[in-house]
Image (spheres, grey):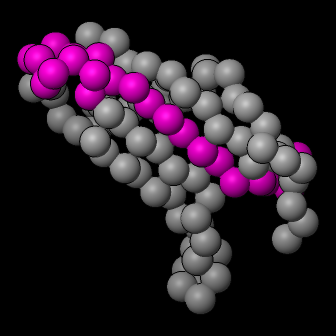
Amino acid sequence: MLIITIDLVPGGYESFRRTIGSMRIANISDLADVSDYKVEVTEGANHLAGTSARNARCTVERHDRRQTIWALLAKAADEATRAKFEDLGSPEKE
């Protein structure tokens, strides 16, 4: 399983670092050369976009494992942008 965490560091100030999203990518094809992956994503609330904290699930199908990790991540991110998200609450004020 791959776990990707996205942190925002406003102005480069580490003391203000906070996690704004994460992604989990799990192989569901017994590590076959061409594999399918389950993808789970979570986003924090974003008051600028007016979105609540939310999560979604999607899949990447028929990924050639001989490609780079960045190819898999790009496919997972593409699927996530088209996934149906479930709201987890109202947007937080920052």
Q: Is residue 64 left or right of residue 87?
A: left
Q: Position of residue 78 (x, y in %)?
A: 49, 25
Q: Is residue 46 left or right of residue 60?
A: right
- Residue nearest the viewer, comparing 87 with 49: 87
Location of residue 21 with respect to 7 vertically, above or below? above
Indicate whether residue 45 is drawn in magenta: yes
Q: Position of residue 44 (x, y in %)?
A: 69, 54
**Quarter of the figure with residue 75:** top left
Indicate whether residue 40 is drawn in magenta: yes
**Quarter of the figure with residue 8:** bottom right
Q: Is residue 61 left or right of residue 77?
A: left
Residue at position x 65%, y 38% in the image: 55
- Residue nearest the viewer, comparing 30 with 92: 30
Q: Position of residue 54 (x, y in %)?
A: 71, 41
Number of residue marks:
0
- Residue nearest the viewer, comparing 9 with 80: 80
Q: Can residue 64 be seen by looking at this rendering?
A: no
Residue at position x 58%, y 52% in the image: 21
Q: Quadrant of the N terminus?
A: top left
Q: Position of residue 47 (x, y in %)?
A: 86, 56
Q: Quadrant of the C terminus?
A: bottom right
Location of residue 79 with respect to 13 vertically, above or below? above
Q: What segment carries the magenta color?
A: 27-50
Q: Can residue 8 be seen by looking at this rendering?
A: yes
Residue at position x 89%, y 50% in the image: 90
Q: Is residue 55 left or right of residue 57?
A: right
